[in-house]
Amino acid sequence: MNRVIYMDYNATTPVDPAVVEAMLPALSQHFGNPSSRTHAYGWAAAQLVDQARSTVAQLLGANPEELVFTSGATEANNLAIKGLAFSSKRRHLVTTAIEHPAVLDACESLKRHGFQVTRVAVGRDGVVDPAEVGRALTDDTLLVSVMLVNNEIGTIQPVAEVARLCHQRGVPVHCDATQGVGKVPVSVQQLEVDLLSLSAHKFYGPKGVGLLYVRRQHPPLRLEPLLHGGGQEQGLRSGTLNVPGIVGMAKALELAVGLLAEETARLATLRDRLRQRLFAAYPGLVENGDPRRRVANTLNVSFPGLDSGALVASLPRLAVSPASACASAKPKPSHVLLALGRSSAEANSALRFSLGRFTTEEEVEAAAAMVEEALAKWRKL
Ligand SMILES: Cc1ncc(COP(=O)(O)O)c(C=O)c1O
């Protein structure tokens, strides 16, 4: 096997060929601007967007007018958090220590505008305790933001429980469900959330498109837009709609929901096989995130005594992710692993394997063999 094996599906996924197929008409003959109300090109594009909106709404248990199409989850998270904060009289937000930077930094930026932020700690299992969230609420809390599935360790958070507790105190809840689609059921009704973010490229759709669900009933949530201009998306997100992206996202969501049960079973078997081989190859291996409350595709393990950056460098034919923020010149240990109580050294020895729709048994065996070989070389050194 000469090509590089892809095991970084939590970073992004390839666009499913059926999604590409669905997008083609929106890239070619139906290229119109859906805001052009005076001619057939605009109408055709608007019709594609309407169809996609209905499909997505139905799959998420939402109403079509409750969806705001965005450029991805980063924008959706920012719109949810800042949009609500700027339209609220309250001044306190609650989130968790293991959120994606698109949530943590959006909250952090609000501190410069006089808001206060509480980051609720998580247990060593990587799961937030709803009671802890309850204890963080004050009469001034305007929003609680809790993710559905953690991108680094794959743990599933008790979002519905958190939402019920917050609603008893009159506090709306935002859920960053970006890593949830195709891995766990995602329904705004079952999760009981008021705001929910998604990004299509995490579920075999195109990059640069996502959405924010905004509850419009009992009572409707009001958000301050972040982008001003043409007034698209009911004035909440100005800018010409990404019609091919939106059409692709709808198709991708349809596929992901349809394949959920089958893929969960298949990937759990593959992930467990990988896990078994890694544990055999490195007896001191430490698993990050509660294995009983984790999605099927993700395996995050620390190799105590090794540096994951160096380990990755010795695996040129395997695309996996060291669990550190490598964006900066000097990699910092992952805030998620530190929040689990891991030391910096343990955090810096972690690798995330994330499997997906195109991962095969053969690839898992080959990947395990590559890691075994790399570890054997390290031992000799
Ligand atoms: C949990 C989570 N939230 C938000 C994002 C941001 O998504 P995007 O970069 O597509 O805006 C990601 C992507 O890594 C993610 O994993």
Image: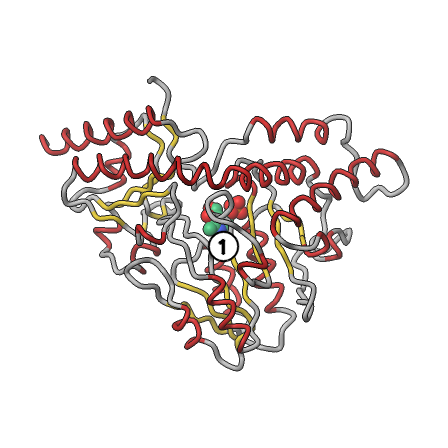
Kindly identify which residue carries mark 1.
102
The image quadrant where one finds the C terminus is top left
Q: Quadrant of residue 321?
A: top left
Percent x, y for residue 351? 29, 42
**Who's the residue at 34% across and 27% down the image?**
361
Let me know if residue 19 appears in the view. Answer: yes
Percent x, y for residue 349? 23, 45
Let me know if residue 333 appears in the view. Answer: no
**Who's the residue at 62% across and 69% down the image?**
86
Q: Nearer the viewer, residue 273 or 22?
A: 273
Looking at the image, which residue sits at the far bottom? Answer: 139
**Who's the residue at 19% across and 44% down the image?**
285
Question: Taking 345 as reference, is 330 left or right?
Answer: right
Percent x, y for residue 262? 46, 37
Looking at the image, which residue sits at the far left? Answer: 380
Percent x, y for residue 82? 58, 63
Q: Quick one: label 1, few (<14), some, or many (20+) residues within 10 Å? A: some
Is the shortest distance between ligand 1 and the CB of mark 1 under 8 Å?
Answer: yes
Secondary structure, mark 1, is: helix
Looking at the image, which residue sits at the far top? Answer: 2
Q: Nearer the viewer, residue 273 or 231?
A: 273
Question: Taking 369 as reference, is 16 left or right?
Answer: right
Please tell me whether residue 42 is drawn above or below residue 134 in the rendered image: above
Disc 1 residue type?
A: Ala
**Who's the residue at 62% across and 49% down the image?**
211
Question: Taking 115 as reference, is 264 left or right?
Answer: left
Please tell me whether residue 335 is drawn above or below residue 171 in the rendered image: above
Q: Quadrant of residue 192?
A: bottom right
